[in-house]
Amino acid sequence: GDSVTQMEGPVTLSEEAFLTINCTYTATGYPSLFWYVQYPGEGLQLLLKATKADDKGSNKGFEATYRKETTSFHLEKGSVQVSDSAVYFCALRGNTGGFKTIFGAGTRLFVKA
Amino acid sequence: GAVVSQHPSRVICKSGTSVKIECRSLDFQATTMFWYRQFPKQSLMLMATSNEGSKATYEQGVEKDKFLINHASLTLSTLTVTSAHPEDSSFYICSARWDPQETQYFGPGTRLLVL
């Protein structure tokens, strides 16, 4: 079945450092891919998405490119801020079986001032 | 983006009581709503999918008599945890969408603590 694998955390960075959180997926067909962010005590917020190969999703300085050849959707940001500290979830939505969204395990990011 | 609300945001109850959590889509009609459960420092586990006007579809291992889901209108779904026990303590998150190929929007979550 469909699955999402993302790098384990926690990831600890200093402010203004470069961020990469790796995400790879397994799916049949052509899923849509998402990154969600969860701040402490809150629900999930959609950060960015890409619906087809080579699409780049971007928002708030974060970017991720849908790479079908490597089945990846890595999240990057050039300069993180303390306010980016949160848990980041990579997810895919298949185009069969009720279009369910499957989540990765989440990666916790700590950004130090 | 679209807004999904949940109520209450936090609830504490005694073991054996039932708790109802509401999920509302505030600015769109949600043909499908999802209920997730999240344990501390873990990912979201899909519990069930509900389509307006029909019975919910539960994921394997989720007791449908324990977690009653009602999706009576296009803007409201409820999850009732019946005869709650301490092991039901968790963070419950709902999600909604108006079209299968559109993005799911998530509520802020409800933290349930059963004493």
Image (spheres, rainbow, N blue to C red):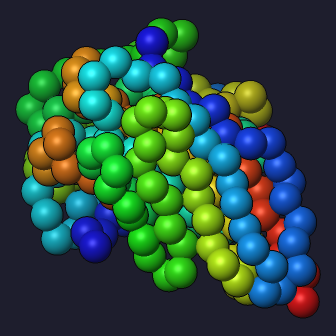
- Above or below A26: residue B2: below
> Looking at the image, which residue is at 32% across and 55% down?
A55
Q: Residue A97: x and y, percent?
A: 25, 18
Q: Residue A12: x and y, percent?
A: 89, 66
Quadrant where the N terminus of chain A is found in the figure: top left
Is A7 positioned to the left or the right of B72 in the image?
A: right
- Above or below A79: residue B74: above
Q: Residue B91: x and y, percent?
A: 62, 47
Q: Nearer the viewer, residue A26 or B85?
A: A26
Quadrant where the C terminus of chain A is found in the figure: bottom right
Quarter of the rendering containing residue B51: top left
Quarter of the rendering containing residue B5: bottom left
> Looking at the image, which residue is at 87% across and 72% down?
A13
> Looking at the image, which residue is at 57% across and 35% down?
A24
- Above or below A51: residue A99: above
All told, the count of numbered labels is: 0
Q: Residue A54: x and y, percent?
A: 34, 51
Q: Is residue A65 visible?
A: yes
Q: Nearer the viewer, residue B43 or B80?
A: B43
The residue sitting at the front extreme is A69
Q: Is residue B96 visible?
A: no
